[in-house]
Amino acid sequence: LISRKTAKARVERGAYLVLGLSHCSECHTPRNFLGASDMSKFLSGTPDGPAGEAAPNINLTATGIGKWSAAEIADVINSGRLPDGNFVGSTMTEVSENLTKLTPQDLKVIVVYLKSIPSISNKVSSKK
C-alpha cells in the first residue's frame, strides 16, 4: 500500500512528463477556433493533428486507450510499438524515439497520471 503523499507525487510527476516534457496535449488535444488547445477535450484526439494527420484519443476510454494494459501503454511510449503489433506513425515516430530515454519509473507515473485524468470519449477518424 502506498501513502497518499506518494500517490500524489506519482500523479504530479506523471503530469509534469505528459504536460511539460513530452507535451502530449500539443498533438492529442483538439484546437479551438483561435488555435489554442481546447482543454475541455484534453487528450481526446483530433483529426487535425500535426502534418494534417489524425492524432488518436489517448484517454482511458473505449474510444481511446482504455482497453490497453498499463504495460501496453508504457510499451507504446517506450518503443512506439502498438498493442496490435503495428507502430506509431507520422511525427509520433520522432517523439517515441525521444521517449525511449524515460526510466521505467517515469513510464509508470505517466500511466498513473493518464489514469487520473477525466476520460473523454471521442472517436477520431482521419480526414482522408
Image (cartoon, rainbow, N blue to C red):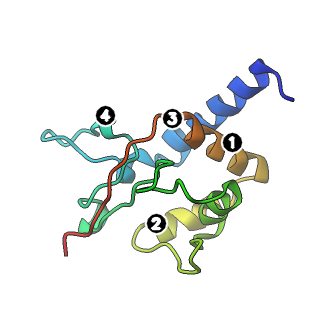
Residue at position x 54%, y 43% in the image: 18
Label 2 secondary element: helix
- Residue placed under numbered mark 1 in the picture: 109
Instruction: Decide: few, some or many residues near mark 3? Use Cα within 10 Å; few <14, some 14-19, many ≥20.
Output: some
Question: In the visual, does 32 lie left or right of 71?
Answer: left
Question: In the visual, does 23 lie left or right of 109?
Answer: left
The kind of residue tagged 2 is Met
Quarter of the figure with residue 100: bottom right
Measured along the vertical axis of the image, is residue 5 above or below residue 71? above
- Residue placed under numbered mark 4 in the picture: 40
Instruction: Decide: few, some or many residues near mark 1? Use Cα within 10 Å; few <14, some 14-19, many ≥20.
Output: many
Tell me the CA gap for discs 4 and 3: 12 Å
Tell me the CA gap for discs 3 and 2: 22 Å
Tell me the CA gap for discs 1 and 4: 23 Å
Label 1 secondary element: helix
- Residue placed under numbered mark 3 in the picture: 117
Quadrant containing the C terminus is bottom left
Instruction: Decide: few, some or many residues near mark 4? Use Cα within 10 Å; few <14, some 14-19, many ≥20.
Output: few
The kind of residue tagged 3 is Ile
| The furthest residue to the left | 33
Question: In the visual, does 52 lie left or right of 56?
Answer: left
Q: Are marks 4 and 3 in contact (CB under 8 Å)?
A: no
The first of marks 1 and 4 along the sequence is 4
In the image shown, does 120 or 20 lie closer to the viewer?
120
The kind of residue tagged 4 is Ser
The kind of residue tagged 1 is Val
